[in-house]
Amino acid sequence: MTNERSAEQVTYAQAGVDIEEGARAVDAIKKTVHSTYRPEVVGDIGGFGGLFSIAAAKDMEDPILVSGTDGVGTKLKIAQLIGKHDTVGIDLVAMCANDILATGAEPLFFLDYIAVGKLDADAVAEVVGGIGEGCRQAGCALIGGEMAEHPGVMDPDDYDLSGFCVGVVDRPKMLDPEQVREGDVLVGLASSGLHSNGYSLARKVCLEGKTREEVMEPVAELGGLGVAEALLAPTRIYVKPVKSVMGECPGAVRALAHITGGGITENLNRALNDGVDAVVEVGTWPVPPIARYTCEAANLSEPEALKTFNMGLGLVLIVDPSRVSEVRAAAEAAGEETFVVGRIEAGTGVVRYENEGTLL
């Protein structure tokens, strides 16, 4: 059998990949990228690898690199539905930076991966603008990334995001579940909404079958926001306030949990050792309107809600009981709303609840 070739040239652009638009996209994001740079950044975007000096670690006793990777998930579908793309990049950075913060690490640099069906330089610049804002909030530098066009694999208007963050912590100052002990206190930091988890359920019960106009219509229970706008509220980035607390109150925070997929039930236990339980006192913090609205739309039971959404707690600090007031004052001075939401008791490393039935 012979392989007959066409006499007509078929270019990469004709196959659906526009290299020139890719170059325009890189030019469009340069200002955003440069706005995130720290003194340790070496070179500029456009090389084969991002360069970052680790000279600052030389003053640490035992520097440990900490890395995290994540995405935004199906929250992106809401952005695509209403054509608002400037905040999902904040979510992307938040999911990675808040995770590595759980060790006490300072995020140093971030890389992103953007997959699109059809590359549009202006749309990519809007998304990267959000990533840049997230990096500025987290104090890390955006030193590189990748834009990949996937014609024939993704719809032209579709895109997906993932990211990768690297930070550093000095081992003697590292937060560690092994430090958690009976009598410690749980201090919760308020979330800004659902953050970036549980959106497959939220979309199903809040948006499915509705038009763009319907999901943009103001809802009284949401303070006049439309459902889509309330769902798109960006994830809070806790790096700077928590690092401030750790600096002002050294040794007061034993461990912390970033409340993501799996809710309080399946994340707070990750900050425990095998000899203790976390006892969460339900009803000691307010539930965001969008969380209550979504749970009611899904007819969720309280236990199911607590293992699906953050329910108003984006981060939980496990604190030395003698220093709770000190930690709360430092966190609130840094702009965070805090709540005493429970305590640590002897146990087997699980999360238990008191006052059940008072959350929803």
Image (cartoon, grey):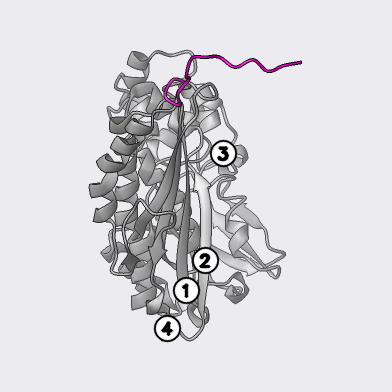
Q: Confirm whether residue 49 shows in the render.
A: yes
Q: Marks 2 and 4: CB-CB under 8 Å?
A: no
Q: Marks 4 and 3: CB-CB under 8 Å?
A: no
- Mark 4 or mark 3: name the one nearer the start of the chain: 4
Circle 4 sits in a helix, a strand or a loop, which is it? helix
Q: Marks 1 and 2: CB-CB under 8 Å?
A: yes
**Nearer the observer, 109 or 91:** 109
- Mark 3 or mark 1: name the one nearer the start of the chain: 1
* Distance CA(mark 4)–CA(mark 1): 12 Å
Residue at which label 4 appears: 58
**Which percent across, then down, holds residue 181?**
60, 74
Q: Marks 2 and 3: CB-CB under 8 Å?
A: no
- Mark 2 or mark 3: name the one nearer the start of the chain: 2
Residue 248, relative to residue 41: is it above or below? below
Between marks 4 and 3 in the image, the one whose residue lies nearer the viewer: 4
**Which percent across, then down, holds residue 122?**
28, 31
Q: Residues within 10 Å of mark 2 (few under 14, many from 20)?
A: many
Residue at which label 3 appears: 305
As drawn, the label of residue 66 is: 2
Circle 2 sits in a helix, a strand or a loop, which is it? strand
Residue 175, relative to residue 205: is it above or below? below
Q: Residues within 10 Å of mark 3 (few under 14, many from 20)?
A: many
Q: Which residues are magenta?
A: 1-14
- Mark 2 or mark 4: name the one nearer the start of the chain: 4
* Distance CA(mark 3)–CA(mark 1): 34 Å
Q: Confirm whether residue 195 shows in the render.
A: no
As drawn, the label of residue 314 is: none
* Distance CA(mark 4)–CA(mark 3): 45 Å
Residue at which label 1 appears: 169
